[in-house]
Image (spheres, rainbow, N blue to C red):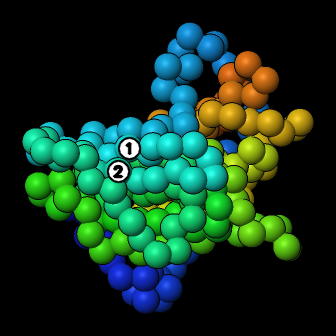
Amino acid sequence: MNPLLTLACASLLAGQDLALSTILVDGQGWKPEPMARVESRLGPDLVAKGPAGASYAITGQAPARSLEYRPASGAPRPVTVVGLVDPSCLGLSPDKGTLAVGDAGGKHLWLFRVNADGALDAADRCATMRLKPGQKASGVIAVSFDPGGRIFACLPHEIHAFDPTARESGVIAGPPGGGVDAFFTNGEGLYVRQKGVVLGRMIQPFPKPALKVPGAPPRGR
């Protein structure tokens, strides 16, 4: 399991945030994308496959959805956490050691530790979405890890970015007009669906590659 993804929240607050400038690419905005290339991967993701044949699912209808753990054998088991209002989407970390669950009825992403047998424990709302004043329900529609472990939570009008330890990096404005209903990232771009059209914008992979300047002397000289 990636140790960065399993630190206690108290430890996360002491670290250095991953600035939004290390994610965005200067001069890049939202552009139409070939729908066939990315549409099959667009969320919201309501089911995730964990280790040992286990899986996790969002069931029911808003505003009374539930999180469910489905072991490889035996009946599904509801996962009840005090404070998790309306689980609306989920995503599994690249190492399958952390499950992130978006709460459309609150302002947090809930992180669960995934054990080797697929069972969940150690639920904590480490990642807090920065909502507008007076807004209590995020309406989050999708949450996605990129290959480097960064976490992206998509709301209808914006995307909240977090570093691999769930510290907030910042808020990325969605495409003009809002109404986003699906999202995913592959670590090189952010992709959304808006009114039936797929749009994307480039981001920098994590970790941020070193900037090479032609003719510059090696570092340390």
User: The C terminus appears in which quarter of the rendering?
Assistant: bottom left
Q: Is residue 81 above or below residue 87?
A: below
Along the horizontal axis of the image, is 3 left or right of 102?
Answer: left
Q: Nearer the viewer, residue 133 or 167?
A: 133
- At 63% from the left and 52% from the top, the residue drawn is 63
Name the amino acid type tagged 1.
Ala
Q: Which residue is mark 1?
A: 57
User: The N terminus appears in which quarter of the rendering?
Assistant: bottom left
**Residue 115 x %, y %:** 17, 61
Dot 1: element: strand
- Residue 68 numbered mark, or none: 2
- Residue 26 numbered mark, or none: none
Residues at circles 2 and 1 in contact by the CB criterion of under 8 Å: yes
**Residue 97 x %, y %:** 25, 58
Dot 2: element: strand
Along the horizontal axis of the image, is 184 left or right of 172?
Answer: left
- At 60% from the left and 36% from the top, the residue drawn is 183
- At 44% from the left and 45% from the top, the residue drawn is 58
Name the amino acid type tagged 2.
Glu
Q: Nearer the viewer, residue 111 or 167?
A: 111
Q: Nearer the viewer, residue 128 or 123?
A: 123
**Residue 155 x %, y %:** 69, 49
